[in-house]
Amino acid sequence: MRQIPAAPMWRSSSYSSGNGQCVEVADHLPGVVPVRDSKLDAGPQLAFGASAWALFVGGLKDRSPR
């Protein structure tokens, strides 16, 4: 399991409505993408390998309506 640095910079998707019901990710961490629930700032976090996260996001983009 990878450890997440002490103070990641979290952001929500530009597609979120800003109502606190979304997933946040931290960018610019070498080789890892931490993910958390926006409602639980101090709650658990998941960490994905950067390449796995890129495949996941790419798959979502392929499925989105245009």
Image (tube, rainbow, N blue to C red):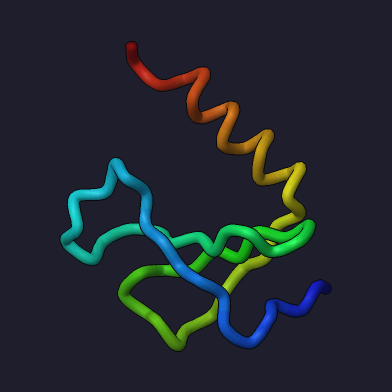
Q: Residue furthest front?
A: 28
Q: Position of residue 63 (x, y in %)?
A: 47, 20
Q: Is residue 11 above or below residue 38?
A: above
Residue 39 horizontal side relative to residue 8, left or right: left
Residue 46 horizontal side relative to residue 65, left or right: right
- State the count of labels: 0
Q: For residue 4, which quarter of the picture?
A: bottom right
Q: Position of residue 18 (x, y in %)?
A: 19, 58
Q: For residue 7, which quarter of the picture?
A: bottom right
**What residue do we see at 50% from left, 71% from top?**
9
Q: Is residue 14 above or below residue 35?
A: above
Residue 21 horizontal side relative to residue 6, left or right: left
**What residue do we see at 31% from left, 75% from top?**
39
Residue 49 horizontal side relative to residue 21, left or right: right
Location of the N terminus by quadrant is bottom right
Question: In the depicted view, which residue is nearer to us: 48 or 5?
Answer: 5
**What residue do we see at 49% from left, 25% from top?**
61
Q: Residue furthest right?
A: 1
Question: In the depicted view, which residue is nearer to us: 9 or 36?
Answer: 9
Q: Position of residue 22 (x, y in %)?
A: 32, 58
Q: For residue 54, which quarter of the picture?
A: top right
Q: Residue furthest top?
A: 66
Location of the C terminus by quadrant is top left
**What residue do we see at 16% from left, 61% from top?**
19
